[in-house]
Image (cartoon, rainbow, N blue to C red):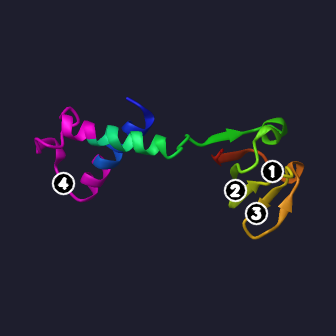
Amino acid sequence: MSDIREALFESLFQIAEDYDINLTNSPDMRPGVPEIGDFCGDVEKAVLAAGYVKPRTITTAAELDALPPGTIIREGILTFSKWGSGAWGTFSGSTYSSDRVDLPVTVLYEP
């Protein structure tokens, strides 16, 4: 089972638990029933088609510099986007060189 499909199953069962819904007694909602498997598979395909990539951690300056323009990273509470010039910009308009970005960072989006 893929990470996305597993996360969908976990989310569905967490929601059911939060709202006191007993999915195990519902014939349409048991994990082995094709309907829910088909639903999770369809969602998984849509998420992947939209460009989802599991966030990854960058720990070295070389990895950070190798990221293409348009990449979005998260450093603590700051979010940066790599510009065509190679600088990292915040959404407030501040710019930083790679050596001013504290590592590690999480890659949220990579074109």
Q: Which residues are magenta?
A: 13-38
Q: Position of residue 51 (x, y in %)?
A: 54, 44
Disc assigned to residue 102: 1
Tell me where residue 47 appears, x and y as whole percent: 45, 45
Looking at the picture, tell me which residue is in the foreground, 44 or 96: 44
* In-image side of 8 versus 58 (left or right): left
Q: Which residue is mark 4?
A: 21
- Secondary structure, mark 2, is loop
Q: Amino acid at mark 2?
A: Gly
For the residues labelled 3 and 2, the Cα–Cα distance comes to 13 Å
Q: CA distance from mark 4 to mark 3?
A: 43 Å
How far apart are the two marked residues, 2 and 4, measured between alpha carbons? 36 Å
Q: Nearer the viewer, mark 4 or mark 3?
A: 3
Is the Cβ of the residue at disc 1 closer than 8 Å to that at disc 4?
A: no
Which quarter shows the N terminus? top left
Pointers 2 and 1 in contact (CB under 8 A)? yes
Q: Which mark is residue 76?
A: 2
**Residue type at tag 4:** Ile
In the rendered image, which quarter is residue 34 located in?
A: top left
Q: Earlier in the sequence, mark 1 or mark 4?
A: 4
* Number of residues whose C-alpha sits closer than 10 Å to that of mark 2, classed few (under 14), some (14–19) or many (20 or more): few
Question: Given the image, on which type of amino acid does mark 1 rest?
Answer: Asp
| Precedes in sequence: disc 2 or disc 4 | 4
Q: Using the image, determine if residue 40 lies above or below residue 83.
A: above
- Spatial CA distance of label 2 from label 1 is 9 Å
**Secondary structure under badge 3?**
strand
* Residue, disc 3: 90
Q: Residue at x 20, y 39 (%)?
A: 35
Residue drawn 26% across the image and 52% down it: 17
Task: Tell me which numbered mark, 1 or 3, is placed earlier along the sequence.
Answer: 3
